[in-house]
Amino acid sequence: MSLSFIKYFFSYIFNSKTRQKLIFLSVIGLVISAFSLTVIQGIMGGLQNGLVNRSKNVLGHSVIDIKTTDQSKINDLKKDLSDNHINFVPELEIELLLQNTNYIKPVIIHGMDFKTYTPEFLANKNTSNLVLGGDLARDIKSYYGSKLKLTSPSHFSFIFTEIPRQGSIVVSDFYTSELPEIDSFSAWVRLSFIQNLIRQKKINKIRIFTPNSDKLFAIVKSFKENEFRFRTWEDENSTLVWALNLETRVMMFLFAGMSFLIGICIISGFLIFYNKVKIDLASFWLLGLSTKHMYRLIYIFGQLISLIFCLLGVGVGLAFLWLLKSNNFILMPDLFVERNIPVKIEYISLLISFFIPYLFATVFTHITFKLFRDENGSFLNLIKKDG
């Protein structure tokens, strides 16, 4: 009897000549809402993940600022990192003035010890001399083989203390990360060149290119805080992380608003539907189905519709994302960083895409059911009225 009850009302909504168009539109709205949430989170996650990965590829997953001057402590730290197979680069980061003929611009020079490890983004570059960021190279009009002058305003000659130290170097290659904050101000060179320029054999950072792990945290904690300062990429880019999270929340809020509007449509649709089938409900009651059991089946029927079509929307959205991810369609022109639409599928995103429309739908379905039950408490009175 229960299965026949559910089948009857499913066919009444979707198959009969008197099918309820408003409910039909409501469930289609649930599918579209779940589908939209799934797709927008997958694509936004892919775009944001691409930006973060490009930044981590250059800046590393984390960085250790060196505060101590004790070389033995620094060597101990490097040994611990090597023993745990953590990719790192000893680095001397310094701000200098970069000059090419009449063009002068400030630059952040990363003096790296390429003998220890060469980061992946420089693996195919000629690091024998200076590797310039793409935008920086255009700003100072430099080319392959251009001879540039580097000036350190904070370091002076031993003899002429009023004259800042300078050095000349040739441009050997260029690198473009498609991130303006890196490409416009960064350059990379071997560590020995910067140490010779400032006449100090030291490093001030150890840049980590292996994803953060418990081993790395344990190594850092084994040293004192006044010796080394550990910062993750997220710590150094907290504003960007906050902005990306805000972008995601705003988009989810907008699509949740769409689910709310669909919920209002569900109330109207189910009230009309219940009003049309109340005589059929009385027939089930006359056939022996108890009032309590019937109301429970009506409630299950409403919740089942919400569940099925929210799952359907997530499933269609997941299939669409898989299609985009597996085929790598080139949809954007050359001027875009991502020419194909990147996709990142996460379980938490799928759960959010399902539960937001489902919760709205189940709340409004419950409200509709309660209104119907309060207005039609007795099927006997309903039969007497119609009689």
Image (cartoon, grey):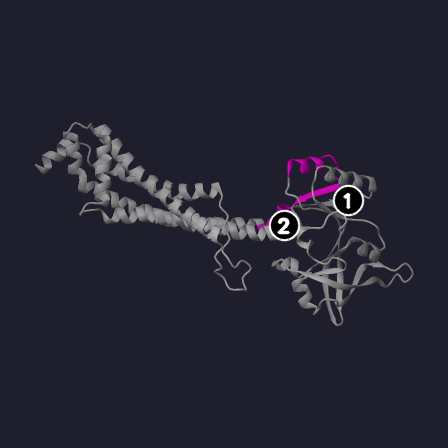
Relative to 310, residue 282 above or below: above
Judge whether residue 223 is colored magenta: yes
Residue 369 appears at what percent x and percent y? 26, 37
Q: Amino acid at mark 1?
A: Lys
The local crowd at label 2, few if under 14, some if 14 to 19, many if 20 or more residues have their Cα within 10 Å, is some
Residue 194 appears at what percent x and percent y? 80, 56
Q: Is 286 situated left or right of 9 in this image?
A: left
Q: CA distance from mark 1 to mark 2?
A: 23 Å
Q: Is 111 situated left or right of 233 in this image?
A: right
Q: Which mark is residue 67?
A: 1
| Residue found at the far right of this picture | 159
Regarding mark 1 in the picture, which secondary structure is present there?
loop
The local crowd at label 1, few if under 14, some if 14 to 19, many if 20 or more residues have their Cα within 10 Å, is some
Relative to 215, residue 208 above or below: below
Q: Quadrant of the N terminus?
A: top left
Circle 2 sits on which residue?
56
Q: Is 215 situated left or right of 385 in this image?
A: right
- Residue at 21%, 33% (x, y): give it: 4
Query: Is residue 226 in sight in this rendering?
Result: no
Regarding mark 2 in the picture, which secondary structure is present there?
helix
- Residue at 57%, 53% (x, y): give it: 51
Q: Is 39 situated left or right of 153 in this image?
A: left
- Residue at 82%, 44% (x, y): give it: 69
Q: Amino acid at mark 2?
A: Lys
The answer to which of 375 and 203 lies nearer the viewer is 203
- Residue at 21%, 46% (x, y): give it: 19
Residue 146, located in which quarter of the rendered image?
bottom right
Q: Which mark is residue 38?
A: none
Residue 277 appears at what percent x and percent y? 18, 40
Q: What are the residue bounds of the magenta stretch?
A: 213-240
Judge whether residue 229 is colored magenta: yes
